[in-house]
Image (cartoon, rainbow, N blue to C red):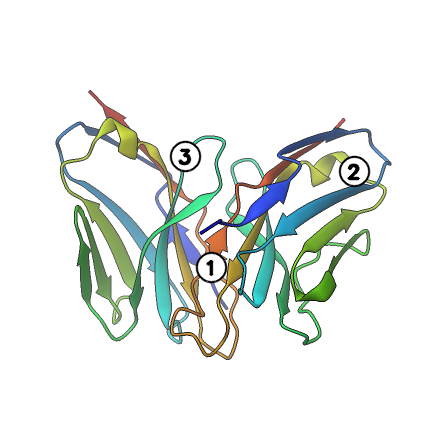
Amino acid sequence: GAGVSQSPSNKVTEKGKDVELRCDPISGHTALYWYRQSLGQGLEFLIYFQGNSAPDKSGLPSDRFSAERTGGSVSTLTIQRTQQEDSAVYLCASSPPLADRDSDTQYFGPGTRLTVL
Amino acid sequence: GEDVEQSLFLSVREGDSSVINCTYTDSSSTYLYWYKQEPGAGLQLLTYIFSNMDMKQDQRLTVLLNKKDKHLSLRIADTQTGDSAIYFCAESMNSGYSTLTFGKGTMLLVSP
């Protein structure tokens, strides 16, 4: 079946502008994660959604970052007043329901490469 | 705290075996993963091992887990140029939900 998709694949923006990044998880997956991968760094956890529960926002680096997940499916990561240090690849992942034996496995999308000029 | 360490770079010749190593610090990890990232692409799940196992084999891939030393390795047999990529080790804890803690990745370069 279809994997996790993300759009846009590339985004170039000017410092100070807002950006929205979209993630479509695998159908039926209840968990959705956002990560950030900066040049030369590992993956940094940003935010986690599980079903209708309140999201775990503990990884968001500042209040300029927010995310929502509508209808338990599609998620949008919003970065307000972008800064150059926000330049990174933003990766989304989804996981099957908690009752599934595979629930800990995360399946990643191709990422959105954000460049802030 | 959680910390996952990997060597940054490995170079091998085509046909040789590659061994990528990873150490982690959280003894409560329940799953350990290997992901592959090709240039410009997202992460592809290669394999994972549950913490009560010490070995898992999947075709050319062999995962070894030494839980006592908190050491995980990925062996790729008969390495091909198409295996050139960045390999990430990650750990998770099954606490009802879990985020993954990733290492910084090991770049594997396979030369002809």
Q: Residue at x 57, y 55 (%)?
A: A25
As shown in the figure, which amino acid type bears the numbered disc 2?
Answer: Gln
**Relative to A17, does residue A103 appear above or below in the rendering?**
below
Circle 2 — which element?
loop
- Residue A57 appears anywhere in the view: no
**Relative to A16, does residue B53 appear above or below in the rendering?**
below
Q: Measure the alpha-carbon separation of dots 3 and 1.
A: 17 Å
On whether disc 2 and disc 3 are found on a single subunit, the reply is no
Q: Residue at x 76, y 26 (%)?
A: A117
Circle 3 — which element?
loop
Q: Residues within 10 Å of mark 1 (few under 14, many from 20)?
A: many
Residue marked by disc 1: A106
**Chain under callout 1:** A
Residue A114, position in %: x, y?
67, 35
The foreground one among A69 and A77 is A69
Q: Which mark is residue B38?
A: 3
Residue B92, position in %: x, y?
44, 67
**Chain under callout 2:** A
**Relative to B55, does residue A22 appear above or below in the rendering?**
above
Residue marked by disc 2: A83
Task: State if disc 1 and disc 3 touch (CB < 8 Å).
Answer: no
Seen in the image, is B16 located left or right of residue B5? left
As shown in the figure, which amino acid type bears the numbered disc 1?
Answer: Gln
On whether disc 3 and disc 1 are found on a single subunit, the reply is no
On whether disc 2 and disc 1 are found on a single subunit, the reply is yes
